[in-house]
Amino acid sequence: MNLKQLQYFVRVFEMQNMTRAAESLHVAQPALSQQIALLEDELGVRLLNRGARGVQPTSEGALLYRHAQTILRQIDTTRSLLAKNDTRIAGTVSIGLASSTARMIALPLMKLVKQEFPGIVLEIVDIPSADLTKLVLQGRVDFSLSPDQQSIKGIEITPLLIEDLYLLTHSSVKLPQKNVPIDRIVAIPLILPSLPNQLRARVDHAFLSARLTYNLFAEASTSAILIPAVREGLAATILPYSAAQPETVSGIIRPHSLDFDLSREISLCSSVGAPENPAVQKVISLTKALIKQLIRDKYWPGCRVLY
């Protein structure tokens, strides 16, 4: 087993297609297939099931993928540790983001990192917020920006900002732009994050405290589904401004502030046992600086910095 085989296997695992994986690696498909077969022969297990619709990992393949990710990440870390100055800092840095946060900072952060440290490749992993710290613990990402993160063994938590929640509606909905009372929301169909979700739990608690019941239209695990539903006028939602920044700028979705307190805290989460990686530390510093700039420039309203 060698590093090239691990890199090939990881790419095939992630793309679930041998042809596309070969194209992305700039190798011939037969050569790629041969390397995967040699890896399976050496390990004595089948890693991938081939079929007409692509490849699917076996349980052994899924296990190897997790370990391969850690191994390849440690190699990147070693390269960064041996760098003598900022211009030589290189490697892949992976960040776990909730969909709403990713919509606000992913693209500007990519541009900033490439401008300041051309040798760093930034990977954005956009998943439901409930799964973010799991990826940190597994070593799949170097750090995450997690909403309402509870204390968990092995995770270092650094609060970054408080983010207010808004009632997000289609622009055709007639409501005051500011300080909408909770009893005005009762009649509006809502599409909300699926449980378990801390934001959803806070919404539930607010209505329970007011002895009111909201009109639940549907549920979804990420804002990638919630926001299109609002954009189509199917329902409103309660999310931070970041979840619908492009749509609010274009006027398709209208954010309404609430007259009751609903907010969430975004924290930077990293593994306590992870070795110090200069590339990761540079990206963390750039992330913090970017967040401050976006809030200061009022590009990210409804936020308060905590650092």
Image (spheres, helix red, strand yellow):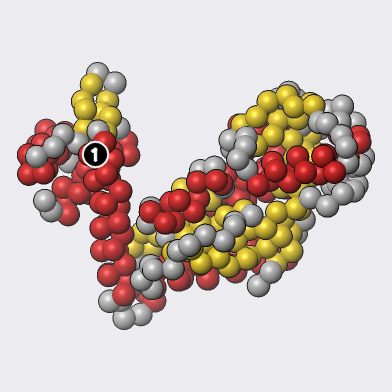
Whether residue 5 is situated above or below residue 142 in the rendered picture: above
Whether residue 137 is situated above or below residue 103 in the rendered picture: below
Badge count: 1
Q: In x, y percent, where is residue 173?
A: 85, 29
Q: Which residue is mark 1?
A: 61
Q: In x, y percent, where is residue 54?
A: 27, 25
Q: Amino acid at mark 1?
A: Gly
Q: Residue at x 27, y 69 (%)?
A: 79
Q: Determine whether, in the image, residue 88 is placed left or right of residue 165.
A: left
Circle 1 residues within 10 Å: few <14, some 14–19, many ≥20: some
Q: Determine whether, in the image, residue 142 is placed left or right of residue 22.
A: right
Q: What is the quadrant of residue 15 in the picture?
A: top left
279 or 206: nearer the viewer: 206
Report whether residue 162 is seen. yes
Q: Residue at x 73, y 24 (%)?
A: 217
Q: In x, y percent, where is residue 68?
A: 25, 51
Whether residue 85 is situated above or below residue 112 in the rendered picture: below
Quadrant assignment for the C terminus:
bottom right
266 or 53: nearer the viewer: 266
Q: In x, y percent, where is residue 208?
A: 82, 39
State the residue lying farthest toward the top.
Answer: 52
Is disc 1 placed on a helix, strand or loop? Answer: helix
Report whether residue 301 is seen. no
148 or 121: nearer the viewer: 148
Q: Residue at x 91, y 42 (%)?
A: 181
Q: Residue at x 60, y 40 (%)?
A: 196
